[in-house]
Image (tube, rainbow, N blue to C red):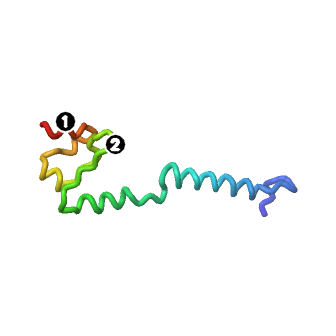
Amino acid sequence: MLKLTPAGLNLTPMSFLLAGLIYFVTLFRFRLFDLVPVARDMLSESMSDGVLVPDLHQRLLDINPAAQQLTGISVTCLGQPLRQLGSS
């Protein structure tokens, strides 16, 4: 329509390819539509039950406010081994 490309050169397929690659990266690498972080904040912070979340190496990944009150563990202890937290 604007005649910016030479005659016979169609950039539409390449544009769709580029857009598809951008969508792929944002969906799978940057988790564009991942709802877990939003749901975590809404659910975990308002729970009356205490929840501790360890990783595979038994380090503390997350703790909600109810668990902080029950155990006395603060948010500054995130990433430390659970064994170390229990002895202090």
| Frontmost residue, 49 versus 28 | 49
Q: Point out which mark residue 84 bears.
A: 1
- Name the quadrant containing residue 39: bottom left
Where's residue 25, x and y in %?
56, 50
Amino acid type assigned to the residue bearing label 1 in the image: Gln
Q: Residue 55 at x, y = what percent?
A: 32, 44
Of 81 and 37, which appears nearest the observer? 81
Left or right of 44, for residue 31: right
Q: Position of residue 3 (x, y in %)?
A: 81, 58
Q: Amino acid at mark 2?
A: Leu
Residue drawn at x 32%, y 39% as measured from the top left: 57
Which residue was labeled with disc 2?
56
Q: Quadrant of the C terminus?
A: top left
Counting other residues with Cα less than 10 Å from the Cα at mark 2, is it few (<14), some (14-19), or many (20 or more)?
few
The CA span between labels 1 and 2 is 16 Å
Q: Is residue 31 above or below residue 56?
A: below
Mark 1 or 2 closer to N-term?
A: 2
SS at mark 1? helix
Asked if 82 appears above or below 9 in the picture, the reply is above
Residue at 18% x, 39% y: name it: 85
Tell me which residue sits at (23%, 62%) in the image.
46
Relative placement, left or right, of 54 versus 12 is left
Instruction: Determine contact: label 1, label 2, CB under 8 Å.
Output: no
